[in-house]
Image (cartoon, rainbow, N blue to C red):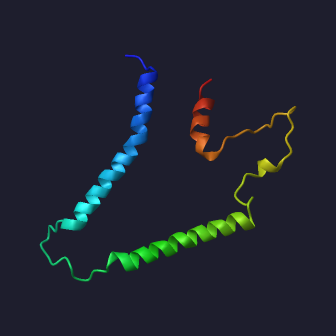
Amino acid sequence: FAVDNATLTRFFALHFLLPFLIAALVMIHLIYLHKTGSSNPLGTQPNIDKIPFHPFFTIKDIVGIISVIYLLTILTLQTPYMLSDPDNFTPANPLVTPVHIQPEWYFLFAYAILRSIP
């Protein structure tokens, strides 16, 4: 077997369409779960002490999302460089390589692997 252009095209198409298929199956599952309800293995009364989802949890989630977006907006507009690396503010000199070059935190595992190989 060989990886050819047709194989890559099919692979990319699969990886593009698979999340939509999974989302559709999740929606179908939620619709059927909403219609029939989930099973109750204990056999007790399931409708005691319940809070309806829509008015309470929907508003609670919307308030939480709006407050997080508000705080992140304030953080980025008031202090845009607070979370950035201090080395980004040193003037660039193309003739001198910095002594300590280290990648971002999400590449550190690959950097450690590269440094361990002689």
Q: Residue at x 12, y 72 (%)?
A: 43
Rendered-image quadrant of the N terminus: top left
Q: Residue at x 19, y 76 (%)?
A: 46
Horizontal relation, residue 88 to residue 63: left or right: right
Horizontal relation, residue 20 to residue 50: left or right: right
**Closest to the observer: 54 or 45?**
54
Horizontal relation, residue 6 to residue 40: left or right: right
* Vertical order, 81 against 18 (above or below): below
Residue 58 at x, y = what percent?
41, 74
Residue 88 at x, y = what percent?
78, 48
Q: Is residue 38 visible?
A: no
Q: Which residue appears farthest toward the bottom when viewing the image?
A: 49
Rendered-image quadrant of the C terminus: top right
* Vertical order, 1 against 66 (above or below): above
* Vertical order, 66 against 13 (above or below): below
Q: Residue at x 42, y 38 (%)?
A: 15
Query: Which image quadrant for residue 99?
Result: top right
Query: Which image quadrant for residue 49?
Result: bottom left
**Closest to the observer: 109 or 61?**
61
Residue 91 at x, y = what percent?
86, 45
Query: Which image quadrant for residue 113?
Result: top right
* Vertical order, 55 against 115 (above or below): below
Residue 107 at x, y = what percent?
60, 41
Q: Which residue appears farthest toward the top when viewing the image?
A: 1
Horizontal relation, residue 118 to residue 38: left or right: right
Task: Tally the numbered discs.
Answer: 0
**Closest to the observer: 14 or 104?**
14
Q: Is residue 97 visible?
A: yes
Q: Residue at x 75, y 39 (%)?
A: 100
